[in-house]
Structure formats: C-alpha cells, structure tokens
Amino acid sequence: MPSSPTPPLDGLDLAALTPALAELGADGWLLFDFHHINPVMTRLLGRDAVALGTRRLFVLLPVRGRPVAVAHRVEQHALAGFPGEVRPYAGWRELHAELRALAAGRTLAMEISPGDAVPYVDRVPHGVIELLESLGARVVSSAPLVTRFAARWSAAELAGHRRAARALAEIAGDALRWAGAEVARGAEVREAALQRRVLDAIDRAGLVTDEPPIVAFQENSALPHYEPREGADRRLQAGQVLLLDLWAGPARQSVFADQTWMAFAGRSPDAEVRRVWEAVRGARDAVIDTLRDRWRSGGGKRGPGGVSGAELDDVARGVIREAGYAEYFVHRTGHSIDRELHGSGPHLDNFETADTRGLIPGVGFSVEPGVYFPGRFGMRSEINVFLAETGPEVTPPAPQKDLLLV
C-alpha cells in the first residue's frame, strides 16, 4: 500500500526556533516557494506539501504563535495536516491582503544573501522582497536558520550516508583496478565504458544517483566538471592520470556520499604528478586537522575556538599556495551536503563566495581541493565530513593516501 503523506513541518523543532529567531532579531521566518525554486522550503515543509508548486506559497514560522500558510485555493489539499492556520487565496489582491497582514511592521527572515554573497542561500526573487517591503516588512537573511534547521542531518540520513560512503569507496577501487588490468592485457578502456561500469556497480549496491560519475583520463582530468561522451571520449593508455568522481545515496532526496579518487596507469608516476598529488592530499588533510583542533578547543561552537567554512577554505588554499599551485586551484574547497548534493548549509568557500557561516553539529560537507593544469592533467581528492557533537567524522573512514597504481 502507498505510504501516508508526511505532515507538513514534521520533525521541525518549533520550540528551538523561537530563541533562534530572537537571536536574529526577527519576528518570524517567512518561507517562499514557486515551482520548486527554494529547496529550504521543501526540506522544512516536506516534499508532499510542495509537490505541485504551480502557485506561490508562503509559510510564516512566527517567533510566537502557530505557523501560518498562505496557499492558493487549488493547492489546499497538499497542506493536509499543517500544524497551524492555512489562509487561502485565489487572486493577487487576496494574496497581497494576506501578506500585508503577515508582514506589516515585522522583521522577517527569508532566503536572501545580501549582494548574492552566498547563492545557495539567495533563493527568493527580488520582486518578492520588493513586494513584502512595500507591504511594510523588513527582510533579513535567514542564513543562520538555514544552517541550523534545514541543513542538519537526521540519524537515519547519517546512517544512509555511511552505507553509501563505504560502498562508493569499494566501487571506486574496483573500477580503477579493472581499468588498469584491462590496459595491461592490451584491451581498450574508454572513459564512457568505465563510467557505465561504475553506474552498474552503484545500481548493484542498491544505491541511486542523479547524474553519471565523472571519469576523466589525462588532459580531461584538468576539467573539473568534465562529462565523457560516447564516441568523443578518451582511451586510457599507460602513463596517464585517471580521475573518478562518483556520488550516490540510498534514495533520491537522501544524503548522498560524494567522493573523488585518483589513479595512475603505470608502475610509477613521474615526479610532478607525485608532487601535485601530495599537495592536494596535504590540503585535504590540513582542513581535517584544523577542524579537529578547533572543535576540541571550541566545543563545536562558532566563536572562540569555532570555525567557518571560509576559514577552512583558506587553510586548504594556503597549502596549495605553498606548493606553488595557487593559480591552478580554481574552485572552492568544499560544498554543503544535505538532501541536495550541493546543499544550502555552510560551504568551505572563501574563493567563489565568502561563506562565513559557522560549522555546527549536525551539518555535513565535502572537502575536495584540486589542482588543474589545462591541456595536461588535473588532481582532486574528495572526502566528506559529518560534524557530530563529539567532533568531525570523515567518510570514507580510510581516505585515499596514495595514488592508486593501476
């Protein structure tokens, strides 16, 4: 039999939201969604409640009192079980009247990022902000609320992530060793063929993914988001670098694991390949060491002893810079992971954006420094971190130490 829909806001700790709003100086958290542009709304309200998304939906979580939803009359059924008041509208005049009642004279937290500093928080269109301000609201960023209430993993999500992480590590090692063995016996191995092999292994492991893995040989590994295409992909030859970036989870909209593994087709990589690998691995490990040190000294709290994603990006970038490869590290150090692979929580980034949000217990993210020489080769090492109350947990538990020689 089909499962019953999850009630809207199920699992949200409304009692904990009150002091968080007070700390932010906000009268409420106003969620907005239209055609699924705001994953924070989906995370908090539940996928069943926003399944249609063909009309504008507002949900106010006030500092005091029960939640209020302003929803179009044609989508009322999606809010069955809503733990508060549902106010219907049909025409725009009705909508504006309802919003005025919610907004006038209030400070409301919404998914905005001043100056678009962090796009993963900047989810509400400018026109919606203009409308609310014209109705008497003051709008502030909900970024701290997103971290605390939308980006943290549940115990079940952590368990699913761990299982996926173990499986992906095994799949990656098997796939890369197979590629090397095939080349050693004179068989042709192409990027697309290795990609298919990995996809098949993910399926056999009972996992799902939303996109095929990145499989890149030699100069293609210098393209961070390379996509192999049948007939235009590269054949593996001895002496080449192999990059395999794969991600999967126990179900769609679950917390995925996301890993990148590096290999070399031959008995011994040259000195430059070894130096680049050591720099990338060193940057990765420096982030983990810094995070553990700061966690011990600060108890996992932002402030004295705490740490932000931007600070950890600086740590990784410093190691790469010291190795002489700063200009070839062209992306952030890591991304948030929640029910979106690139989630809404804090990112390890002070390069593409300035994400100064504190890393708090319950959130997870990738750590993936990289060095890319256009037209030659690239190197990346990617692991994931979950921040438990007791400190950071790295997945997979045994990160790649040396280049796989295949």
Image (spheres, rainbow, N blue to C red):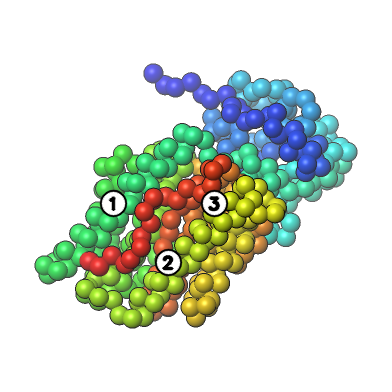
Q: Which residue is mark 3?
A: 336
Q: Quadrant of residue 36?
A: top right
Whether 309 is drawn above or below 271: the answer is: above
Q: Pick whichever of labels 3 and 1 is earlier in the sequence.
A: 1
Whether 83 is drawn above or below 303: the answer is: above
Q: Which residue is mark 1?
A: 171
Q: Pick whichever of labels 2 and 3 is earlier in the sequence.
A: 2
Please give the name of the residue rendered at 61% of the width and 20% of the height, measured from the top-left corner: 81
Q: Position of residue 404 (x, y in %)?
A: 28, 65
Please give the name of the residue rendered at 88% of the width and 38% of the height, measured from the top-left corner: 105
Camera-nearest label, 1 or 2 = 2
The label shown at residue 281 is: 2
Please give the name of the residue rendered at 40% of the width and 42% of the height, measured from the top-left corner: 162
> CA separation, marks 2 and 3?
20 Å
Q: Are marks 3 and 1 in contact (CB under 8 Å)?
A: no
Q: Secondary structure at mark 2?
A: helix
Q: Secondary structure at mark 3?
A: strand
Quadrant occupied by the C terminus: bottom left
Please give the name of the residue rendered at 36% of the width and 71% of the height, measured from the top-left corner: 220
Q: Secondary structure at mark 1?
A: helix
Is residue 87 at all visible to an observer of this figure? Answer: no
Q: Residues within 10 Å of mark 1 (few under 14, many from 20)?
A: some
